[in-house]
Amino acid sequence: MIFFVNRLRLSFRVLDPVQFPAGKAANSLRGALGTTAPEWFAIRVESGPSGLRNRPRPFVLRAAHLDGHTIAPGESFYFEVNLFDRRDAVAATLTDAFATIVRQGIGLGRGRAELAASASYPLEVELASKPFPITNISVRFVTPTELKDKNTLASQPDFGILFTRVRDRISALSVLYGAGPLDLDFKGLGERAAQVRMTRCDTREIELHRRSSRTGQVHPIGGFVGEAEYEGDLAEFVPFLEAAQFTGVGRQTVWGKGQIEVCTVPPA
């Protein structure tokens, strides 16, 4: 089983001072895209995988390194877009949309910049179980993360909850934009994931809010960041977590929430 990702890296040369708000660089880009190219965020009500009624977007933004930074004229900055749609035309259209957005002005002072370079790095992530035992891993929650557990938000990233959200997101993206349905034992995977123990949890809550330019309403975009360690028979789960490093996990992944990093660690 293969999961496809096309990593787009867009670099810009700054014309006016560009100031990105603390904790909200990716949200600024997402908001501008929603205004300039609303078709990327049109709501589609349909019957989808795992009971989804709204189609997940075919990309996520990676711009957390720009949070709180001001870039002076003549300097440059970049951000990345992880794209899950294989079609070359989609990558080109998204690149053109962001070039237009940044040329018109972005950030707190709507400073302008011009596209200097774009690069595409397509890759395929193998989802089959690792051919060797893995018993201990750590997961770092790089950007604010919210994981739904039934009808509430989980207070901590227990492995069963984390993996279920990862599995369902990757499955939905594969069905809608990739090679098609994954050949998975969903129930069995979930049951085995629930047996993995969380041995350490060092997370903290981040409070952030955004104001909708369309409605004026304020929405929370925070969540927890930090690190957790897990112990168990993890070989079949690690490939999905590796793929989730590109997709993100949980709520509001489009603007960079739920970014994770996975590392295998030696047993204690």
Image (cartoon, helix red, strand yellow):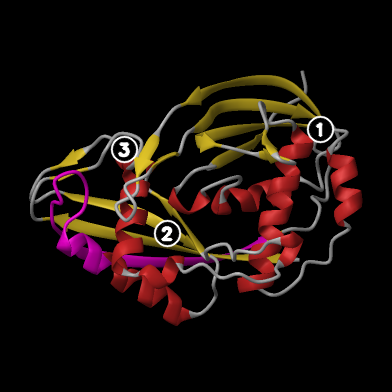
Which residue occupies the foreground of this view, 234 or 84? Answer: 84
Chain-order first, disc 1 or disc 2: 2
Q: Which residues are magenta?
A: 99-125
Q: Secondary structure at mark 2?
A: strand
**Horizontal relation, residue 97 to residue 194: left or right:** left
Badge 2 local density, few (<14 within 10 Å), some, or many (20+)? many
**Above or below, comparing residue 193 to residue 182 in the picture:** above
Q: Secondary structure at mark 1?
A: loop
In the rendering, which numbered label is found on residue 67? 3
Q: Which residue is mark 1?
A: 135
Q: Which residue is mark 2?
A: 81
Mark 1 or 2, which is nearer the eye? 2
Q: CA distance from mark 3 to mark 1?
A: 35 Å
Q: Position of residue 98 (x, y in %)?
A: 29, 65
- Amino acid on which disc 2 is placed: Val
In the rendering, which numbered label is found on residue 217? none
Q: CA distance from mark 1 to mark 2?
A: 32 Å
Q: Which residue is located at x 10 percent, y 44 percent? A: 72
Residue 250 part of the magenta-drawn span: no
